[in-house]
Amino acid sequence: MGRRNEKTRSERLKARILVVDDEPLVAETLRDILESEGFKVKRAENGREALDTLMSDHRFDLIITDMKMPEMDGLELLRRVQKMKKNLPVIVLTGYATLKNGLQAIREEVYDYISKPFSVSVLMIAVREALKDKARRRRYEERLQNTAGNHSW
């Protein structure tokens, strides 16, 4: 059991998360929570800054974004991220949770949709599950590539 916990901790130390929120207090709180769990965190103040960051640094494992921001909302950011990086999970946080927004987020294939104020445990469950799912997808894609490379049709 100890080895599994060590591996989980080392995986977290390698995971890089982009936090996108125009409210400095929320963004800093998220950074503190995630860094205390061993994640590497970078912050963007809005969707445009997040896209610029993703263009210059492709090594993120997860995005956590606010839904309602000036210039570009979280769902528009999600759409643009999906065009750039298909396997990058996005968790949307919102202080304006409505059924309509939740359904729209699901249609846009957001990984998770969490209402503010959020509990740390709910956030951390979503983060861990998103990272596990990303790792599973990456392993599956690698197996597919290896299998395709071993066959000559």
Image (spheres, rainbow, N blue to C red):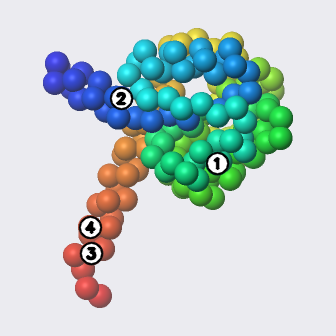
**Does residue 123 appear in this view?**
no
Residue 96: image location, x then y, percent: 80, 23
Q: For marks 1 and 4, give the CA distance.
A: 33 Å
Q: For marks 3 and 2, give the CA distance.
A: 31 Å
Q: Which residue is mark 3?
A: 149
Callouts 4 and 3 close, C-beta under 8 Å: yes
Q: Amino acid at mark 2?
A: Arg
Q: Which residue is mark 4?
A: 146
Residue 77: image location, x then y, percent: 70, 45
- Nearest to viewer (mark 1 / mark 4): 1
**Secondary element at image label 2:** helix
- Nearest to viewer (mark 2 / mark 4): 2
Q: Amino acid at mark 4?
A: Asn
Q: Which residue is mark 1?
A: 52
Q: Amino acid at mark 3?
A: Gly
Q: Which residue is mark 2?
A: 12
Q: Is residue 83 left or right of residue 70?
A: left
Q: For marks 2 and 4, give the CA distance.
A: 26 Å
